[in-house]
Image: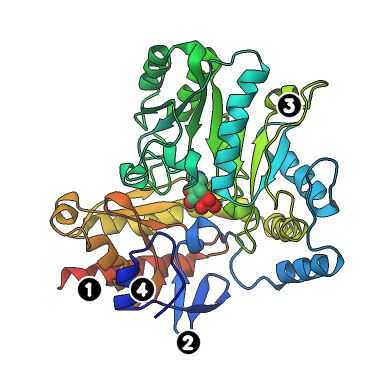
Amino acid sequence: MTSFWHPFADMHAVETNGSTTLVRGEGAYVIDDTGRRYLDATASLWYCNVGWGRAEIADAVAAQMRELPAYSAFGDLTNRPAEALAERVSSLAPVEGSKVFLTSGGSDSIDTATKMARRYWQLRAEPDRTVLIRREKAYHGMHTAGTSLAGIPANAAGHGELIEDVTEVPWDDAGALRAAIEDDGPGRVAAFFCEPVIGAGGVFPPPPGYLEAARTVCREFGVLFVADEVITGFGRTGDWFASTRFGLDPDIVTCAKGITSGYLPMGGVIASPWVAEPFWADGAGLWRHGYTYSGHASVAAAALANLDIMEREGLCERALKLEAPLLDALLPLAEHELVEEVRGGVGLLAAVNLRQDLVADEPSLPAQVGMACREAGMLVRPLVGGAIAVSPPLVIGDEEIAEIARAFTAGLNAVAAR
Ligand SMILES: Cc1ncc(COP(=O)(O)O)c(C=O)c1O
């Protein structure tokens, strides 16, 4: 019996079937309390970009904790690691001169971005711009704003109406985005939320030209383009940000995960200079928004040490170099009798999608394959729609890529044989 209520879990099943306790990590591997090693093919929840066991992050945090673990940054108070991190993130950001609002995670960042977008239009004297546009398949975290922006229906169900004025568009059609803006009324739309590569909705890289066309539509109607880079930021797609790779010039970027590689929880909202301007202007007054741990000194120290490693080891370039080998290794799985297709090809992000007919007959099939992969020594993550995600730490090499394909094949074969 446990008192720990797991996130995103069927607790009856966890209590009935038991759980796996992880105790240590090394590079691209994690080890459980029986000593079993698993290849971490998902970098935990898409976040451990620098891999496990980085003592230098622990040392940086310990040193900061001895000095000043944390102090509120409300109002005029600040601390050195938060200042240094904001400068560093701003220098890496897709838009020069951006300002960085620090949070405790991706959902915080999305909540902040929705409020920033709506308030921006108030400050710009267009208060009717309140509509937020989401895409089908979207995942923007599980706070109230993110739940309202969920394009995965099951993730929004059962909570009643949360925030109002949200419109959904297809995930892959910039023409439909234009039609939706025209339909809502161009003077009503505040912002369009967009994952450059859809993650939790099944790992869908953008159709060629889609992101650029959606960006153009937003610019035409003055709608803020919010790139949700919680997964794609900090190297995952082969650049510091996918927005840079796709030349999106976003108005707002949300990030989290890879900023610390998950060694401590942190997120951020990167506001382009033109979005920040009315908030920073003389007479704008106090923005009554922020979190107890915004600019947490020890977490910022972890982030700085993480970014040092990313830069020193060239992990963005490594992700770019390995994107084709990862996809090439997974593509043969598309021939497996349980598999419908393999998606990937933008950075170290891929999914093996099981056949829809089989998943409709047996909804537990993705979980079964996930478990069978675990038995074969690899952690993967089943997503909605029968997709199984692969997003390894950016430190993997050719041998681990081959191992991912081998363990996947073993897992699929074990389930097919039942
Ligand atoms: C695109 C995207 N946005 C937001 C979030 C929410 O982040 P968090 O779980 O850190 O709150 C996630 C989490 O996976 C995500 O993938």
**Drawn side of residue 418 relative to residue 165, left or right:** left
- Specify which label sits upstream in the sequence, 3 or 1: 3
In front of the other: 376 or 218: 218
What residue is at 46 percent from the left and 78 percent from the top? 21
Amino acid of disc 1: Ala
Q: Nearer the viewer, mark 4 or mark 3?
A: 3
What's the CA distance linking mark 1 and mark 2? 23 Å
Residues tagged 4 and 2 counted as in contact (Cβ below 8 A)? no
Q: Nearer the viewer, mark 1 or mark 4?
A: 4
Q: Which residue is mark 3?
A: 279
**Drawn side of residue 209 relative to residue 408, left or right:** right
Q: Which residue is mark 2?
A: 35
Residues tagged 3 and 2 counted as in contact (Cβ below 8 A)? no
Amino acid of disc 4: Arg
Q: Which residue is mark 1?
A: 414
**Drawn side of residue 17 relative to residue 148, left or right:** left
- Specify which label sits upstream in the sequence, 3 or 2: 2
Q: Nearer the viewer, mark 3 or mark 2?
A: 3
**Residue 90 coordinates in the image, percent (x, y):** 73, 39
Image quarter of the N terminus: bottom left
